Amino acid sequence: MRVFYAADTSLHAPEFFLLRGRPTLNEERAERAERLLAGIARLGLETEEPAEAGRMPVARVHSPRFLDFLETAWCQWQKLPGAGAEVLGNVQPRRAEATYPTGIVGRAGWHMGDLACPIGQYTYRAAMRAADSALAAARAAVNGGRVAYALARPPGHHTSREVAAGHCILNNAAIAAADLVALGARPAILDIDVHHGNGTQAIFYDRADVLMVSVHTDPGSFYPWFVGHAHEAGIGAGEGANVNLPLPMGADDEAWLGAIETALASISRFGADVLVLSLGLDVHESDPLGGMAVTTAGIRRAGARLGALKIPVAIIQEGGYLSAALSDNIAAFFEGFLDRGGA
């Protein structure tokens, strides 16, 4: 199995986060990658730097003005009197009556859906390299490798066509899936992060060529709050190509694994010839975001089930935040997936 990781993604080091009205340290820290790398190393897997793919594959899912904003926002922000170290959109428009703003404060609000994804000096570079990792993994999986993994941070599944949110900057899984479509494949995306993949859903919601399935904590009581419900099935050409499987807060191994089985049945009916897996280890019982209570053994079992699929799988890292078990969980997932320790 090939593993793609770009060292420049460690340059993204967000600080600000708002938790129940209290400023606190952002959970999407570079140490996440260090712990994931440590878990992967236990299996004897080595990483490789992905090639730089440039803007073109990214622009299949993100708008030009959003990419321009990400590339220039930090420098423009620093020209503001008394500017902070990070770009934060403190006011968001109501889109029905909104006009695209010209100033950097307004554009920050337009392109940032919440305060969980601050933009620093190196965020754009890191996000582009994370997207490169996802693209490399997808191409490796379908070009004879069968499975490949992108250790991509910042993560991506909360970012829509032009709004970043929830620790995410560019939607790595969506970029990979769109690239696979361009290569002639019929991909499905399976998102098993504790949070609904609302950005990914939005990107493909009116499309029939990519199936999006998300297993997540019920948004009635958990981020992203407003979308991710079971009745959301797609619109227009995409009707029926979006499947949400929300679970109650605190869902355990059996509930999570059962929902994954339901998801795989939908993927089989769709006739996907490649799977893009948005892997979120934040389902674990010790994760600081606390939405589910899946055990390390449960994560190993999920790996084994997904490793048994007969189609290529490109695994894209989403959540999984700082806990003592993070290295154990990524190792367990791949032990199961690669059948190196049983299910």
Image: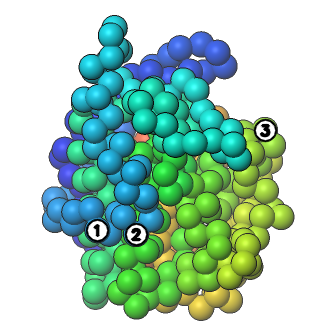
Q: What's the residue type where badge 1 is placed?
A: Met
The dot on residue 60 is 2
Residue 189 image offset from top left, x and y in percent? 54, 71
Task: Tell me which amino acid carries mark 2.
Answer: Arg
From the image, state whether disc 3 or disc 2 is nearer to you. Answer: 2
Inter-mark Cα distance, 1 to 2: 7 Å
| Res. 88 image quadrant | top left
Q: Read off the residue under disc 1.
A: 56
Could you tell me which secondary element the residue under label 3 belongs to? loop
Q: Is residue 300 left or right of residue 315?
A: right
Q: How far from the left and from the top, in percent, is residue 13?
A: 31, 30
Residue position marked by numbered label 3 in the rendering: 221
Nearer the observer, 72 or 120? 72
Mark 2 Cα-neighbour bin, 10 Å: few <14, some 14–19, many ≥20? some
Give above or below for 238 relative to 287: below
Q: Are marks 1 and 2 in contact (CB under 8 Å)?
A: yes
Residue 230 coordinates in the image, percent (x, y): 81, 62
**Which quarter of the rendering shows the N terminus?**
bottom left
Residue that appears at 62% across and 36% down: 93
- Label pair 3/2, CB-CB below 8 angstroms: no
